[in-house]
Structure formats: C-alpha cells, structure tokens
Image (cartoon, rainbow, N blue to C red):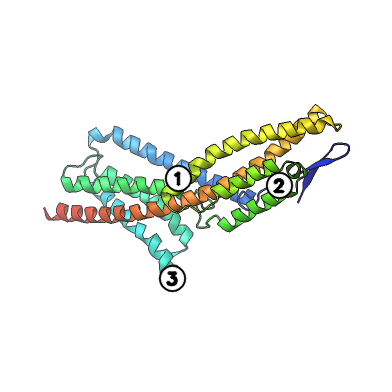
C-alpha cells in the first residue's frame, strides 16, 4: 500500500492513497465510455429517423399493404423474432455455432429497437384496426421495456458485456479500506469516528430481504452517509484543533490533512454505496425480467394474430 505521511513534530498521521482498480480500472472505464458513445450515436440516429417519419407521415409515402411499407413490416417482424436467439444461445450449448453470447447480446439490444422502428414506418405511425393497434402498442412497450432493462443491466455489469461486477471483490475492497482506517493514527486516536464509519457499513451492507427492502436500503444509505459525513467533519476538525495546540501544526498542514482524511472517507463511502447499489440493481433486474418475458409473449401473440388477420381478411 502507498501512504502519505504528515510529520507533526512529535507524531505523524498516515493516509492511504490506494486506488480502487478492480472495478474502476482504466480499461473498464474506457470500455464503458465507448459503449456509451456507441449507444448514444445509435439512439440519436433512431430518434432522428422516428422524428423524420413522424413529420412526413401525412404524405403517406409508405403504405402497409404494398411495396416498401409491406417489406418494412416483414423486416420488423423478423428482427423481433430474432430476439429469442440470445436467450436460447445462452441456455443451449448446441447453438454455439451461431456466434458468441456477446455478439447476440448486442444484436438483441439493437434488434429490440430497430424492429419496432421498422414496424412504425410499416404502419405509417398509425393503426387502422384493433389487432394492428394491439400489435403496434405491444412492440413499443417491449422496446421501452428493453431500454429500461439495459439501463439496469449496465449498473451491475462491466458496461455492455456479460461480465457481472464481482460482489465478493467489492466486499474485499471495502474490508481492506476498513483495515486501512483501523491502523490509521488519526482514526486510532478518534474511536468515535471509526465506529460511526464501521456502523454505517454494517447497516447498509446487510443483504436486503426483498426488492422493497433494497429500495429502503439505498434511500436510507444516502441520508445516513450525508449525516455521518457532517459528523465526521466536525469530529476531525475538533481533533485537529486540539492536536495542533500541543504540536507544531500549521493551518496549511491541517487543511492538507483534512483533505486527505475526506478523500479516505469518500473512498469508503463510495465502496459501501457500490455494494448497496449492486444489491438494488440486481434485484431490480430480476424483477424486470419477470415482467419483460410476459410482455414479449404478448407481443408475439399480437403480431401473429395481426399477420393472420391481414392475410385472411
């Protein structure tokens, strides 16, 4: 571990400078930024296409019964049906010849957005019958649900990959930070401050029993952390003031020490929040998955009914 030591004449205060690299390594951060850039460009193009189609819908350049509009409908349905390949590829090893899971994960996200866009153009942003209206709405709902799922997904994965954030690593990092705080001279001299920090970790890191409990935990962690942060500033300010009375400790040196102490506490809170958020988003994703699958099945049924109705009647 790397430390910065501040000499105070008869004593010293050592602060830990260790960086958290397991979760926020340079390569992972760079990958997340690229994922964000690609998805931002993708969503911008999709939004522009939808806006352009909406503006020109009154000209009826595309009709669902024939020509380009008809083929847009076929493309949209095919893309939506291909969405099932990703979950099947994950669960059936025999489908490995289709490509890697990462490839199909990206295609799953892209097809889930592009497919409904093709259907919107196919319908010219309108629906003339009940079955077509149900099919169109169900597709839009599934697409919006997919966007929500993606948002939750990246909160406890390394970006848009299948690599889940390792909860054990987060807990190990937090435990190491607690050890560094325990041996630090300042926190040894102020057991009250150390106890507040450790009690905070014990409270917020208790595994939630349900999704509702995870919401309560992440909300309470926020205001508790803020309150403890104010308390820690007061305690440390008082300690340094009393410590300076008997030692050669200048105002500049005290300010420098306070800054290092705040950074150490901030790292500690950051790690604690990561574990709390991990629990929340993991449970949120499980709940989202339970809701998303019935929506997909409803969409498939609505699309099949719409196709049969159009071609038979």
Q: Residue at x 38, y 37 (%)?
A: 48
Q: Find disc 2 in the rendering and name its residue.
A: 181
Relative depth, front residue between 190 and 97: 190
Say few, some or many: other residues with alpha carbon within 10 Å of mark 1 (under 14 / 14 to 19 / 20 or more): some
Q: Secondary structure at mark 3?
A: helix
**For residue 136, which numbered disc appears in the image?**
none
Mark 3 or 2: the one toward you: 2
- Residue furthest bottom as drawn: 94
Q: Is residue 127 left or right of residue 228?
A: left
Using residue 3 as the reference point, say whether residue 64 is left or right of it.
Answer: left
Where does the image place residue 110, in percent across and percent down from the top left?
40, 50
Q: Secondary structure at mark 2?
A: helix
For the residues labelled 3 and 1, the Cα–Cα distance comes to 36 Å
Percent position (x, y) of residue 223? 53, 37
**Left or right of 149: which side holds 121?**
left
Q: Residue furthest front?
A: 192
Q: Residue 93: which numbered mark, if any? A: 3
Residue at position x 30%, y 32% in the image: 55
Q: Which residue is at 83% across, 41% downward?
A: 12
- Confirm or deny contact between disc 1 and disc 2 (CB under 8 A): no
Q: Residue at x 60, y 54 (%)?
A: 171
The label number, if any, that marks residue 215 in the structure image: 1
Residue 305 placement (x, y as % from top left): 19, 55
The secondary structure type at the circle numbered 1 is helix
């Amino acid at each position: 571990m790397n430390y910065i030591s501040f000499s105070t004449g008869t004593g010293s205060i050592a602060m830990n400078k260790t960086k958290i690299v397991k979760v926020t390594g340079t390569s992972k951060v760079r990958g997340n930024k690229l994922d964000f850039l690609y998805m931002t460009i993708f969503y911008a193009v999709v939004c522009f296409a939808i806006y352009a189609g909406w503006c020109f819908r009154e000209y009826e350049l595309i009709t669902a019964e024939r020509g380009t509009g008809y083929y847009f409908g076929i493309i949209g349905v095919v893309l939506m049906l291909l969405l099932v390949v990703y979950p099947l590829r994950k669960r059936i090893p025999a489908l490995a010849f289709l490509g890697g899971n990462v490839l199909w994960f990206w295609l799953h996200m892209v097809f889930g957005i592009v497919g409904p866009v093709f259907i919107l153009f196919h319908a010219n942003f309108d629906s003339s019958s009940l079955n077509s209206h149900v099919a169109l709405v169900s597709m839009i709902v599934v697409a919006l649900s997919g966007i929500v799922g993606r948002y939750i997904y990246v909160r406890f994965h390394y970006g848009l990959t299948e690599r889940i954030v390792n909860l054990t690593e987060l807990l190990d990092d937090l435990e190491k930070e607690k050890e560094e705080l325990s041996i630090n001279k300042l926190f040894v001299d102020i057991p009250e401050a150390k106890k507040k920090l450790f009690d905070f970790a014990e409270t917020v890191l208790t595994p939630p029993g349900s999704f509702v409990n995870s919401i309560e935990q992440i909300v309470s962690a926020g205001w508790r952390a803020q309150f403890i942060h104010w308390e820690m500033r007061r305690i440390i300010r008082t300690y340094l003031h009393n410590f300076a009375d008997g030692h050669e400790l200048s105002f500049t040196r005290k300010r420098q020490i306070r800054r290092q102490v705040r950074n150490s506490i901030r790292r500690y809170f950051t790690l604690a929040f990561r574990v709390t958020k991990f629990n929340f988003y993991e449970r949120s994703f499980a709940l989202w998955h339970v809701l998303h699958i019935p929506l997909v099945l409803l969409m498939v049924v609505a699309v099949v009914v719409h196709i049969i109705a159009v071609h038979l009647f």
